[in-house]
Amino acid sequence: MSAPLPAQEQAKAEEQKLSPAELKKRAKAEKQARRAAQKGGQEQDGDVGASATAPNGVNGDSNTTKHDSGATQQQHAQKPKGEKQQKGQQQQKHGRQGAQEVESHHKRTGSQSQPLPIRRRPSQSGAPPVVQKPAPKKINKQVELFSHLYTQPRRQSIEGVSKDIHPAVLALGFQMSSYEICGSSARCVAMLLAFKEAIQAYTTPAGTSLARHLTSHYLSPQIDFLKSCRPISESMGNAIRWLKKLIVEIDPDTSEQDAKDDLCERIDTFIRERITVTDQAIATSACQQIKDGSVVLTYAKSSIVERTILEAHTNGTKFRVIVVDSRPLFEGKSLATSLMHAGLEVEYLPYSAISHAVKQATLVLLGAHSMLSNGRLQSRVGTASVAMQAAKSDIPVIVCCESVKFSGKVALDSIVLNEVAPAEELLLPSQSASAKPAKEDTSEDAEAKPKSLSDWKDIANLQILNLMYDVTPAEYIRMVICEYGSLPPSSVPVVHRLANEGM
Amino acid sequence: MPAPVVGQTPSLTTFLKSLKHSPIETSIELLISLLRRRQISHSRPCALATAHLLLRVVAAERLKPTTDSTVAALRLIERIRDVGRRLVAAQPREMAVGNIVRRVLGVVREVVEEQGDGGEESSGGGSEPMSPLAPAVPQDLRPRPRTPGDATPPNFDGPSDIAVNSRRPALASSTSYAGQGPQSTSLLSFLEHPLGRSPTATPSTPGTPSRKSTQDKQEKLDIKAEVIDGIKELLDELEVVDTQIAESALEHIHSGETILTHGSSQTVQKFLTTAARKRKFTVVHAEGWPNDHEATHATIVNGGGGTGIEDEKWKPLTSMGVTVILIPDTAIFALMSRINKVLISPHIVLANGSLLAAAGTSTIALAAQAHSVPVVVLAGVYKLSPVYPFDTQELIEYGDPSKVVGFEEGEFVEGVDVGNPVLDFVETETVGLFVTNLGGCARGYLYRVVADHYRGEDVDLSAAAAPNGKTVA
């Protein structure tokens, strides 16, 4: 599938990935860490021990919700690693990477076992303490225009993951990289739940305080791990910022357990207030836009849109839904299925049929990945065309979006801010149609005379681009519904300040 | 265009083979069923099949030796109309069928008119030395007899008007409009000047009967022979149309461009390949899920060609040093801001310049318009249809929904209405330029090109035959 980036390139990619804001954050974190380290050098030992033992202990009762499959896999992988992790990791690396990589790794593992706080920093700042999964992307396979987005291949295996990473977070990471948990809100909620478990499993090392140590030394690696699985969404970013602020503000006098309980409770409140109840409020408000006889057009899948439609249906409104879907994720299929089960009249159209869908529609409801401060909507790739077609036919385009997804960033096009998903997702399951295990099947086909697309890596000059998001111009959006009410896209920065920065 | 044919699946190839040795009525029925079953689909295969069939129909028509030429011609027209009606009724959305029928009808009318006033005109036209640069001389809609009286300004640039007025100068002047006159072959012009075939034309009947020997019997034979010649010219045109379009590639593509295209059109591929021989550029290729993505992938990976009967194959663009970026259709809007040009090859161009093209094209065209990116439409003249789109919805064809959701997902298919439109209607406002085998033209001029190729009487095929006087008088 994929093989390793050269070590230097990878390191570079790591650097590039960080935005200035993140760099600043990182610098701050480092400073904090240094101070913490100066305070008590020896605590590191305790810390390492705690986090090393934590995983297995918590694993059992974690992941009750969605994480099950991931968690069990996780356990299998984790146990053998438990004691010998250091050794095993090193061996693996010796096998695959160049000397450089091994050396840097030595440093890292060394720091974990020795009480040398300063040397620990490389692992906690920026670079996840990780060796990348092999991924030999030839340079010419990256679309030049998007070269800034090819940071690193998504992590698909547990190999080389630092033992600090809490199993719940580990499981979540893989669920995110495989789209099992997909969607901005879902990822945000799942992350907060995982963090709750991680926080409960955390013990403050002696000589430092929870407020000072938790974020930089414990949460940051977890976040970095999640980032390595899939770039985090705006809602996750907002939630993380909120959580960090919360941790810093903890009264140093509170006992550790109290502080942790408090944090967990606050996280629950956050999820409830900012997402669960908000979704309900938005759905209630948005479903008033659906009238009897309406034809609601939606694209891909958004949980709020689903909720809105279901609520309108429960209210007894008679209307029809058109779900437009696209390759490769087919998210709309699950939306159509759930609406079908609810007894709605659903039409399912491929992406090529937007113009036909728009002809029938009276209302377009869209979900969001993020609302940008210049009023533009960042959402699943393809949303912009749907909104454009609708706007050209004068059909109202309404975006349902929690304020936690509002962002301070601005973007004019879909190129600077985006995420590139693995191109392999776009390959057809297999040319001979039936069999699922794609890899072997396609390679067999390839031996037959005409080449197939799955040989794309061997074909010079051929690139496959699989974007995740696009940016919809504000002029296509008639209204944004968030928990603060219905607003024009131009009011997004106001709500963002109010909701995400004013706290 | 469809993927290469395997085995004995009914297709254009098998149809053309069977055409040679089956009775004419059987062939007609076969084509009708092939069209109905969509085993011949897309404009070019349909056009080819229709032209070949009509060739046989005309050849098989027995004109009584006693009948005078006009009557014979009328019978021929009636026969072609009848076959055409049946073909069109079989698959009304394949408008290329109707286009070819109309053009063949035009050929017949042309021949009749030639003979009607053959006296003066042929002596003038036939005796002049033939220029090898005989380009397309589109025919005017007006019946020929009125022409002598018509006051057409001699320096008016419309080729057809000049063509009507004095034929020889028209050949020269129309080159400017055609842009690449020398290669253009329009059968109609050659019918008027049977000796003036361009080198690319098939040498169908070396001793084309000259109008000077106008004995009665000869005349009757002439009608059939000349119509057959005309259809052969038409077939030639269909053969070379993509190449002719591709010849103007260098006028439209410069180095370093980023070009977006969609689906697996061979016309576009040929166009790009021609440009790639001289220039390096980038192609962003949208795959056209769910109807065309497999063919698109195959085209990108293996190159084009080899689909028709006599098509040559050519290398994929990637092997010519052109970077090809495959994207799903969803990413079109995201990338459009970086695209310099959009190339589209529609199924049909309607009389007002709007297009029927593969589903998804309308999104591309609108996105291009939103980003002020020019949309270049590549279409052979045979794709220009005189049909005016009053009801766009009825032109749209719906395809196999199992391409969207497989029938193995029974519950889903049962409970959800799955649709799969194959065609999109694209408004003419989104199109920047049409490139036909006669050269480029703006959408405002397109109606003229359409009018040049079809007779007014033939636009409505389903209508009863025109009264005799009108056609021949």
Image: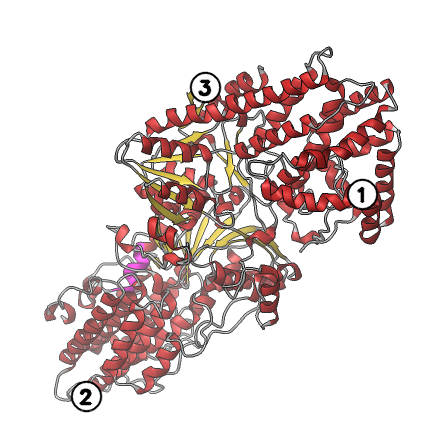
Q: Mark 1 and 3 residues: CB-CB less than 8 Å, in contact?
A: no
Q: Which of the two residues, A225 or B382, is positioned nearer the viewer here? A: A225
Q: Which mark is drawn over residue B215?
A: 2
Circle 1 chain: A
| Residue B388 drawn at (x, y percent) | 25, 54
Q: Which residue is mark 3?
A: A484
Q: Which residue is mark 1?
A: A85
The residues bearing labels 2 and 3 have C-alpha atoms spaced at a distance of: 92 Å
Q: Which of the two residues, A146 or A403, is positioned nearer the viewer here? A: A403
In this rendering, position of residue A203 left or right of residue B324: right
**Foreground tag (2 vs 3):** 3
Q: How many marks?
A: 3
In the displayed structure, B175 sits above or below A487; it is below
Q: Can residue A225 be seen?
A: yes
Circle 3 chain: A
In this rendering, position of residue B207 left or right of residue B214: right
Label 2 secondary element: loop
Q: Main secondary structure of the magenta part?
A: helix
Q: Which residues are magenta?
A: B447-454
Around disc 1, counting alpha carbons within 10 Å, would you say few (fewer than 14), some (14 to 19), or many (20 or more)? Answer: some
